[in-house]
């Protein structure tokens, strides 16, 4: 290291220690460069399986945990996308516009779906702690306000782009443990 410092010293370069890589850096990297690669690195061959099994294996299930939150500090969304291999991609989004708590829940779910589509996800299990949002999207509750109807239409449009989406309601404390840790750390 010292040798490189001496060699590069003549060029007025300043060496800086490497800082920690944030969790969203990997997601940003994948989103930026995934579309440039036509081939996939993983080639799967199972000649003894039926077409149904191959179809299921070629589109594995991803899991999306999301949580929207509003407090005195503003509004934010925490998104954790779990790859089939078990890796976690964590994204925090800070809203610079006024949202209610329900709007923040919709915004986080919509952004999670958009990120999933960008990643090429076909089968997705989305987990939310908002009973209202889950039931409105699944058809159990009616969307009444004009803003809520817009969010619902946007959700339905995004869901149609996937092969299959399952939206599940998880208990409040379970969803919070996964996403809230990263929301308010700026």
Image (cartoon, rainbow, N blue to C red):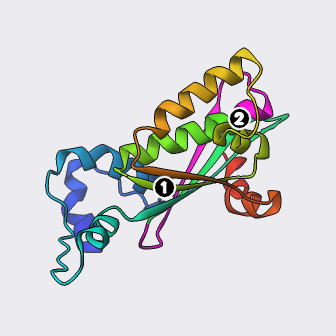
* Viewer-proximal residue among 60 and 71: 60
Q: Residue 129: within the magenta?
A: no
Please tell me which of labels 1 and 2 falls first in the chain: 2
**Image quarter in which the C terminus is found:** top right
The answer to whether residue 32 is seen in the rendering is yes
- Per the image, the residue denoted by label 2 is 104
Q: Secondary structure at mark 2?
A: helix
Image coordinates for residue 176, horizontal then vertical, percent: 76, 57
* Label disc, if present, on residue 47 of the rendered structure: none
Would residue 115 be found to the left or right of residue 53 on screen? right
Q: Residue 94: within the magenta?
A: yes
Who's the residue at 35% across and 46% down the image?
A: 31
Q: Secondary structure at mark 1?
A: strand
Q: Is residue 151 above or below residue 65?
A: above
* Label disc, if present, on residue 124 of the rendered structure: 1
Region rendered in magenta: 84-103
Look at discs 1 and 2 and give the one toward the viewer.
1
* Viewer-proximal residue among 63 and 74: 63
Would residue 68 be found to the left or right of residue 112 on screen? right
Image coordinates for residue 75, horizontal then vertical, percent: 73, 34
Image coordinates for residue 166, horizontal then vertical, percent: 56, 53
């Amino acid at each position: 290291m010292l040798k490189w410092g001496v060699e590069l010293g003549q060029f007025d370069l300043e060496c800086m220690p490497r800082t920690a890589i944030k969790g969203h850096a990997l997601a940003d990297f994948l989103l930026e460069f995934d579309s440039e690669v036509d081939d996939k690195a993983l080639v799967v061959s199972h000649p003894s399986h039926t077409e149904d099994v191959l179809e299921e294996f070629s589109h594995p299930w991803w899991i999306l945990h999301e949580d929207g939150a509003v407090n005195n500090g503003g509004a934010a969304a925490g998104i954790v996308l779990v790859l089939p291999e078990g890796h976690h991609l964590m994204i925090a989004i800070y809203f610079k516009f006024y949202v209610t708590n329900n709007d923040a829940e919709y915004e986080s779910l919509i952004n999670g779906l958009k990120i999933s589509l960008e990643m090429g996800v076909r089968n997705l299990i989305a987990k939310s702690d908002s009973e209202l949002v889950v039931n409105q999207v699944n058809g159990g509750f009616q969307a009444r306000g004009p803003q809520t109807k817009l969010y619902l239409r946007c959700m339905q449009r995004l869901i149609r782009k996937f092969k299959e989406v399952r939206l599940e309601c998880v208990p409040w404390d379970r969803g919070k443990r996964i996403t809230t840790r990263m929301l308010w750390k700026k």
